[in-house]
Image (cartoon, rainbow, N blue to C red):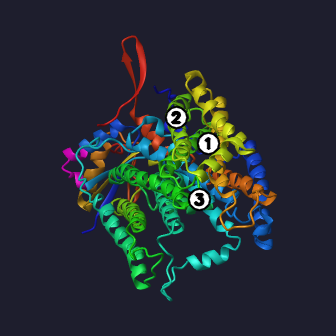
Amino acid sequence: MAIREVLGIYKDLDSAVAAADALREAGFDRAEFEVLSNAPYPEGTFGEESGIHRLFVFPLIGACCGFAAGLLITGGTQLSFPLLTGGKPLLSIPPMIIIMYEGTMLGALIFTVLGVLFESRLPWIGKALYDTRITAGYIGILVRTAPERESLAISALRKANPEDVLTEGGSVGGTAPAAQ
Amino acid sequence: MQERHQLGEEAITRELFRPLVSTPAMMWVGFIGLGAVLAIFVFAVSWMFYWGLGVTGLHRPNMWGFMIVNFVFWIGISHAGVMISAILRLTQAEWRRPVTRAAEVMTIFSLMTAMLHPVIHTGRPWRTLYWVFPYDFWRNLWPDIRGPLVWDPSAILTYLTGSTLFLYTTIIPDMALARDRTTGWRHVLYSILALGWRGNERQWKMQTIAGFLLSGLILPVFVSVHSIVSWDFAVSLVPTWHATVFAPYFVIGAIHSGVSAVVTLMALMRWLFRFENYIRLEHFDSIGRLLIAVGTGWLWFFLLDIFFAIYPQEARELEIMQFRLFDWPFNVMTALIFIFGYFIPVPIWVFQRFRRNVKIMFWTSIAVNVGMWAERYWLIKPGLMRKYEWTFDWAWYRPSIVEISIVMGSFALVGFLLLVFSKIFPPISVWEEKEGVHFAQQLQVGKRRVNAIVREF
């Protein structure tokens, strides 16, 4: 089923919150719209979010991979070419721990960043309605809905005094056109 | 205490993007001046490559000289950057906002500069790189992981990778802002770096969690790196190097010099980019208080190192320590370390009116790093400048003009890279400043109107 996008642009936080409420009152589910802003707001500013994520798993996986790589580099290289030096044990634990520790941390760091990108859905190369005013301080409310509910979304967004309302066809204005 | 001026979002963007769109005269002076010193650096390094290490003051048994001292110094500088950023993020300290980006960038450029030194120090770096990269899987000949010279690059590369990822993750929202405001090659560059960032709730949530997670992960790495650098010396049998106190001593020394370097950088950014609204006196005040604690901690470890060398009454340790404390030029250097590293700056920082004076903070932070560079030289060189058993040729170490040029050039390199960075990327995190504005409040407490920050617990 085709999905249509409608983007409401709001000058201030209160209007954006009012728009989110208007959308909910019009029967839109929270998962059907998202809020775009140029800085983070506390969780729940625009109502309950569907915020399930698995970011905390990524550093753990990374740490395990890094530890394994560290073990392979230290233990594996020494066992593959056994070279006894000064009567010391072949597998020398203290230096192995140093390399394995660094490997563990490196794996955790890399996987955390990968996790952040994955959970943020970045890089985003798809097309989505966007307006550069958002990074200038405006707040955008992007509704993704079925084509038959597009006009309902537009009227809900207009209730909260938007600066502008954009659809895939272009701007439809912040206020409804006067009746003829 | 927050002395924040009431600034609109547009004003914040305009002011923080100013270095990207305009180049003040002093910035040109910086580019030309640092570029000239950098040219001398390149010439000196090329000269050394062409003629060999004979053009330096290195000889048996002084095989480590200015370049290794400088390596340790820059590793130290790199430490406080990410440490400050990570600790302030974890504790949600409000004054972190204008400091974190510059501190993180300084970490990366200092680390890169530091890494350059052991490589060029070999005299034939292409051969070094040939033997190190790629890891030789074909002949099953592996570097011996029991040597600290393998631990060292593993720690530094981990730290460099982590710091770069840390910086990049936090810079993505600003890249989106730059993308939306630029055209031409800049637009293409920022679009690529922004990765399609749109600023939805999920992305901001991940950004916030990433700040905590990466801070928590990078802090142990930061402690490990300078510990491991200290083991380059401490696991050897050279008198005065062979000390168990070296790891924490190096870490606290790195924090002392690094936090001071952050103060230097803050003052320069405030003057050069006219960031008075962002890098405020309260920030110097806070970091000055931190420096008192760090500086005193460093002094304790400095004294411990001397005590530990004297206490066992081992002849070789005592000889070197006597050489360090009473013989020219190390006696002067000892005084220099004490005076510049502690006794000038710390008593000054005790007074709030001095902590809130940018010029005084700038010059005291420079003094600390003069003292700390001397401290690294004082730590590394005397142990080597002695006659070893069964070694019959030994002499005093005198750095050559080539080594002096390399040391000067390393400062120019870091400065030049920082200037180039601030021409391409905002040197203060714009989104974090705006976040601060969103949460800024004024509260009436009795008869006083207090600037405050609303924070979620």
Q: Is residue A26 magenta?
A: yes
In the figure, is residue B370 to the left or right of B289?
Answer: right
Tell me the kind of residue under disc 3: Val
Q: Which residue is mark 1?
A: B265
Residue B330 picture quarter = top right
Q: Is residue B196 magenta?
A: no
Q: Position of residue B86 (x, y in %)?
A: 44, 47
Residue at figure coordinates x 74%, y 52% from the top left: B408
In the figure, is residue B11 to the left or right of A144?
Answer: right
Q: Position of residue A7 (x, y in %)?
A: 36, 52
Q: Secondary structure at mark 2?
A: helix
Tell me the kind of residue under disc 2: Thr
Q: Which residue is mark 3?
A: B238
Say few, some or many: other residues with alpha carbon within 10 Å of mark 2 (under 14 / 14 to 19 / 20 or more): some
Q: Are marks 1 and 2 on the same chain?
A: yes
Q: Secondary structure at mark 3?
A: loop
Mark 1 vs 3, N-terminal side:
3
Placement of B3 over or under A66, stated as above or below:
above
The subunit carrying tag 3 is B
Q: Which residue is mark 2?
A: B296
Mark 3 vs 2, N-terminal side:
3
- Judged by its main secondary structure, the magenta piece is helix
Q: Which label sits in the foreground, 1 or 2?
A: 2
Q: Which label sits in the foreground, 1 or 3?
A: 3
Q: Which residues are magenta?
A: A22-31
In the figure, is residue B160 to the left or right of A151?
Answer: right
Q: Observer-nearest residue: B235 or B277?
A: B235
Residue at figure coordinates x 80%, y 72% from the top left: B51
Residue at figure coordinates x 32%, y 44% from the top left: A158
